[in-house]
Image (cartoon, rainbow, N blue to C red):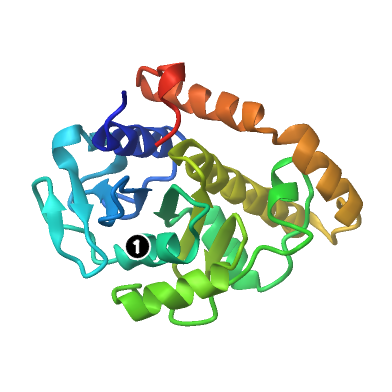
Amino acid sequence: MTSPAEHVVRAHRALAAAGQGDLVWGHAGLRDGDDRGVWTKASGWGFEEITTERVVLVAPDGAVLAGEGPRHVEYPIHTEVLRARPDLGAVVHTHPRAATAFAALDVPLRALDHDGVLFSEPDVPRFGGTGGLIRTPELGAAVAAALGDARALLLPRHGVVAVGATVAEAVVHAVLLDRACRTQLRAMAAGELRGWSDAAECAAKRTECWSPTQIDAGWRYLLRRAGVPHDPTEEKP
Ligand SMILES: [Zn+2]
């Protein structure tokens, strides 16, 4: 049985392998099985540096209930999104370059490739509040409200939030969102957009391209790239 700390290590190693690191900032969080809060990385470490000794359990009020080391200031992103979405097991918050640059354009995200169908029709939501740190439960609740029932949220002037039933799903959603944004940035830099998937094609491709099996295949690839062992019996948090 994979421990919560081991799930958190895998999430961060996979994010590192996908290029989502931002020096020591950003974090993935896993819902605590006893509803005490979120398991996430301690602050001060890069994604590829995370070991089970650098994982903490943080309560919704910010108290560190288990593990060594300080918590991240933006822990309320995890605790408040998980509070608002009982369907979720994991939340990722990163500062990926393409998604952040794309958010500055303030244009709809179009499904220009397979990745984009997860975040288009309906358009990926944007947080309309601060571009600063999400450092209070009130701001975390506002982020959760902006996310709604979506897979991901753009935080203009800041980064992204991506969610999933498992750490695998949340990590892959974060990676795919940044790739979809990068594709559109490249296309818009070259000229006017002329073609993208409509609502019907997006819906069909969400099933065709992004079944749980495919999400899992992408996750396993990232774990192999990161050199982290994978046990197929241990996927659910
Ligand atoms: Zn942040």
- Comparing 97 with 226, the one in front is 226
The CB of the residue at mark 1 lies under 8 Å from ligand 1: no
Give the answer, above or below, for where 137 lies relative to 199: below
Q: Which residue is rendered at x = 27% and y = 66% of the image?
A: 60
Q: Residue furthest front?
A: 34
Q: Is residue 213 left or right of residue 194?
A: left
How far from the left and from the top, in percent, is residue 162? 51, 54
Give the answer, above or below, for where 168 lies relative to 44: above
Inspect this view and state whether residue 198 appears.
no
Q: How many marks?
A: 1
How far from the left and from the top, in percent, is residue 52? 19, 34
Inspect this view and state whether residue 174 appears.
yes
Give the answer, above or below, for where 66 lies relative to 140: above
Q: Is residue 123 left or right of residue 36?
A: right
Q: Which residue is rendered at x = 39% and y = 72% of the image?
A: 140
Q: Quadrant of residue 209?
A: top right
Question: Which quarter shows the C terminus?
Answer: top left
Q: Which residue is rendered at x = 82% and y = 58% of the image?
A: 191
How crowded is the residue under tag 1: few (<14 C-alpha within 10 Å), some, or many (20+)?
many
Question: Which quarter shows the N terminus?
Answer: top left
Secondary element at image label 1: helix
According to the picture, the residue beneath numbered tag 1 turns out to be 79
How far from the left and from the top, in percent, is residue 13? 35, 33
Name the amino acid, label 1.
Answer: Thr
How far from the left and from the top, in percent, is residue 210? 70, 36
Q: Which residue is rendered at x = 40% and y = 24% of the image?
A: 234
- Comparing 164 with 228, the one in front is 164
